[in-house]
Amino acid sequence: MTKVTKAVIAAAGFGTRFLPQTKAMPKEMLPLIDKPIIQYVVEELVKVGIEDIVIVTGYSKRSIEDHFDRPSQDLVNNLRQGGESKKPLLDEIRAISEMANFIYVRQKGLYGSGTPLLNVEHIIGDEPFIYTWSDDFIVSEPLRFQQMIDAYEEFNCPILSTVKASSDKDYDRYGFAAGNPLRDGIIEVNKIVEKPGKEAAPSDMATCSGFLLTPDIFKYLHQSFDILEEGKEFVANDALDLMVNDGKRVIAKEIENARYYDAGNKLEYLKTVVDFALRREDIADDFRKYLIEILQ
């Protein structure tokens, strides 16, 4: 079995829900305390052994490339002048560019989650890979990507990351896995139902925040593109449905001990910032006291 060492991050969206902030700064670069959102995704990928990270970008995304590049000499000189107190910061920013091999591709094609995949087909080649997003993620123990890799090594097929729906609104926001439950938290998929509503949902397992895909997905992406109805969004789930209909195995895996964060909208972003601040040893106590004061 080929080891999973590549990942694709879709980061080409305009971030319209955060305008005017995202007019000049990508939503992926919005800070969670002192790191951009996308860095948390990259760090988790690196922790599970990913070596090559392909980031599919679009207009005005140059700052993502700059962030994962080597620091400018001006910044290095400035931190050096700060002496020993600034050395940890210097080491940290230097380490960012060394985390992985970064490859950048400009997105071309129709709107939808299928397009970034077709854009990177020539880079991925004949290898399994993780496909994930730059503004949402799952915090879990073990790490969600490790849980997906473990499931891939057990079933040797594509793995869909899922979390249990937590509200009625979730059934109108996500796709849901349908199929044969193999055991608690594992479904052998026969269909992905997009935004079914609670009454029509085939399960409570919402597909979100990423896939672990095998290279045969590209065959079905091309097929899906060829039969796509005019005006319809080109989504990866349609290709997965074609794969399942062709007799290929696909597994939906519920991420254990999971907390899902969707930092792509204003309210959820603010919740994410608060949660992350309360986990930080250097600021958690003072921040908690502040929250208590203003809420009294």
Image (cartoon, grey):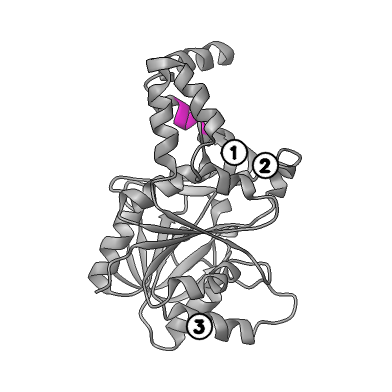
The label shown at residue 30 is 1
Query: Residue 167 at x, y = what percent?
Result: 52, 49
Q: CA distance from mark 3 to mark 1?
A: 34 Å
Of the image marks 2 and 1, the number of the one nearer the N terminus: 2
- Comes first in the chain, label 3 or label 1: 1
Residues 248 and 254: in front is 248
- Tag in front: 3 or 1: 1
Name the spot of residue 230 as percent of width and height, x first: 74, 80
SS class, disc 3:
helix
Mark 2–mark 1 CB contact (< 8 Å): yes
According to the picture, the residue beneath numbered tag 3 turns out to be 220
Instruction: Look at the image and give the residue range highlighted in magenta.
Output: 273-277
> Could you tell me the amino acid type at mark 3?
Tyr
Q: CA distance from mark 3 to mark 2?
A: 34 Å
- Label 2 sits on residue: 25
Q: Is residue 270 above or below residue 130?
A: above
| Residue 23 seen in this snapshot | yes
Residue 195: x and y, percent?
58, 64
For mark 2, give the secondary structure.
loop
Q: Which residue is painted at 39% across and 28% down in the image?
A: 279
Disc nearest the viewer among 3 and 2:
2
Question: Disc 2 marks which amino acid?
Answer: Met
Relative side of 261 to 87, left or right = right
User: Quadrant of the image for the N terminus?
Assistant: bottom left
| Residue drawn 30% across the image and 62% down it | 149
